[in-house]
Image (spheres, helix red, strand yellow):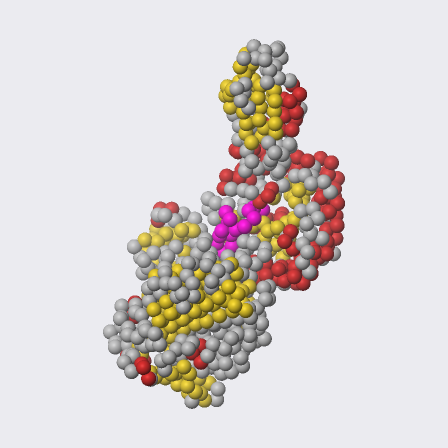
Amino acid sequence: MMMKNVLGRGAAALVWVVVAVWSKAAVGVLVLSLATAGSATVYYVDATGGNDTNSGTSQAAAWQTVAKVNTVSFAAGDQILFRRGGVWRESLVVPSSGAAGNPIQFDAYGVGAAPVLTGYLDLAAASWTVDSGNVWKASVTASGMNFVLLGSIWGKKQSAKANVLNDRDWYFASNVLYVYATANPATYYGGVAAMLGAGGQAIYINGKSYVNVQHFQITYFDTYGVRVGGASDHINVANVWAESGIPNGVLPHGFYVNSTTAAAAINFYNDDAHRNYNGFTVSGTSGVVVENCRAYANRMYGLSDNTSNTSFSHSHFYGNGIGVLPATDVSGGADGGNNLAAYTAPSVVGFGKYVARVTFTVDDVGLTPGTDTYINTLTPEFEKRGLRMAMAIQTGYAASYVPAIQGWAAAGHDPNSHSWSHQYYTYPNAFSIQYTGTGSAATMTITGNRLTTSVTGGLGGENLNIDLTDPAYDTIQELWAYIVGHGGYAATKDANVQGAAHSYTLGDVSGQDVKTAAYIVSFLKSRLMADELGASRAWITANVGAAWAKVYVYPDGIEDVETQGYAVAAGYEGSRGGLSMGLGSSDVYGAGVNIQDVTSLGVDVLHGLTAQQIQDRMAALVFKAEAWGVPYGLFGHKDTVTPAEIDAMLDGLTQHGASVMTNTQLFDFLAGTSTVAGTTYRVNWAEGREANLRAVGGSVTAGVGANLGVGYQVDLDGRDRSVVGWDVGAETGSAVTRVSGGGSASGAGVVR
């Protein structure tokens, strides 16, 4: 027999787990309370064999529900043990505090997989009946619901049952879930799962002290996995796995701390936080330790600490920040040392739920002289791999580049529209104008594509009467030059104005005094942006061909919902959009990719790095894309990266499994996926199995963790991690003795 201390690191009380081992196979766990725990009680919770009317004080008389646990006032030193293999679709709200040296413990007993707290409720075919027409209903007991997974695609929540009119529409009220489907939803979509616990947390420790939580797997929560708030202190959360997988804006957080206690002594040991918004979030709290933890593929940060006091050590953060190219693995915090180096790729069972689709574009052909020559140094790197690249054409300046652009298209490359002039409404001012003649008054009117002035007195011929669509005046440069040269007027262009912007996109003004003071003439957004997109697409169609007029590449990545509408109206199949997840915060295939806002990532940050460093960054990008299904549009500018750096970038992408495409190829693919009614979103079924971020043998996290003592050496699956050296994370990837049951390292990474 082996005896293991299961209290906190350095705890004074003696509580022992006695483990019987026979032929290296676990046969049971007996929990004994000794020393200062004389009055402590061990309680048991069994999801299938328990009953809340039982005493809970023996395995044979176990409770059944988390709700029961939440109502009990526990004493210091009490242990509340959840049976392995059990699944609870409830939230654990810790009801009591322990005492110094005698904490209350929430842990596991028995053999099998770790206890699971999940929001995932699978609704089989038998759950569904027809409500009316193509609306089906199923009874679901829940306080609310924000997400429903239909097959591998997230549904579209409606505000009323009457709005459930299209594929993936759903509505929830009075414990009834309504879903649109032309046949039984479970078969029509290949499965339906309701996400319970809307807006809550799987484990909530609020205003409690001296609490230990170990050996839970937490999945499909839409707000918090483990939340520690209020005046909480002396909390240990160890060997816990928190993985949501729900794309929910700036939520969910795997582990979230916002205690009001100074120096709260809150410790996270051997924990995993994957596919959340943030893995670990610390807000306004000091005294937090993150040690021996892993955080992969979180949509923003692996660890986010706004205090810069959280100590993190012996941990591994990778592939976080799906809306940016440089990984955002850690923000804030205090590096306690011995963390795995940034961009150290993990060894996991698998993460390829989606294909990583990535494009590369060089911007500003026409606007920036020499860009054509620069592009010609890069295309060989693509062609030798059988790939093609994209070129973003500033069409208002590109007349002299037509032969080069046509040559790229003929070679299979992808010239795309990049606006007419590179003018954007962020800078609405075009020029100032003031009448400087001898007349006593002067006004200006712009209406119906015509600019006129009316001068009282003065010299003859001073009045302006300009058709803004006339080729002689239809750009801001031409119009400004004409006004300056006309005599009787002073005019100054705004420093941010692009000369090729069309003058007929100026805003209307009626009888504006231009004698007393200079007047700033501004663009009208609806005219400017519609023209920038429309004129550019017309130029591409006329000079290259309609096949290359499908894609719009936003200048400077500046866009908004209005301009997305202009892109649709102009006839673009899709657009490469903002420079972060920004407008498309849900731009993952399962939630819906906004086809008018595919995320753009600048590769300028790769310049000056070694080939290996570039390849490592591309590997992380592929990891993120395959875990979440994010399509990326990489881009650069003249001389910002070298051909050798592009070579390394392409090696990093292709060698790690990315599908390198042109923009047109990407949008042709997206256009072939299912549309979300009434939106510019497209959704795609997953092409691989669910991401499984469990470590495998030989993992980079094997044997590099700190030895935290006997209280934490039993991993999530019930194996003794101390046998071969401490692995980082909740579970060990090594083949070691199982001391209290659990699943294997190759088992499902997400338990539903």
Q: Residue at x 71, y 35 (%)?
A: 399
Q: State which region is magenta.
A: 573-591
Is residue 48 visible in the rendered image? The answer is: no
Q: Is residue 130 magenta?
A: no
Q: Horizontal and vertical percent for residue 576?
A: 58, 46
Task: Classify residue 205 by image quadrant.
Answer: bottom left
Q: Quadrant of the C terminus?
A: bottom left
Task: Using the image, determine if residue 516 lies above or below residue 644.
Answer: above
Q: Residue at x 59, y 59 (%)?
A: 621
Instruction: Give the side of residue 385 with respect to residue 72, left or right.
Output: right
SS assignment for the magenta stretch, majority: loop
Q: Residue at x 65, y 18 (%)?
A: 486
Q: Horizontal and vertical percent for residue 37?
A: 31, 81
Q: Horizontal and vertical percent for residue 584?
A: 51, 49
Query: How many callouts does the rendering have?
Result: 0
Q: Residue at x 64, y 51 (%)?
A: 604
Is residue 523 visible in the rendered image? The answer is: yes
Q: Quadrant of the N terminus?
A: bottom left
Q: Which residue lies most toward the front here?
A: 262
Q: Horizontal and vertical percent for residue 552?
A: 60, 42
Front residue of 198/557: it is 557
Instruction: Give the side of residue 122 with respect to residue 324, left or right.
Output: left
Front residue of 646/751: it is 646
Task: Classify residue 421 by image quadrant.
Answer: top right
Instruction: Give the side of residue 287 with respect to residue 95, left or right.
Output: right
Front residue of 257/199: it is 257
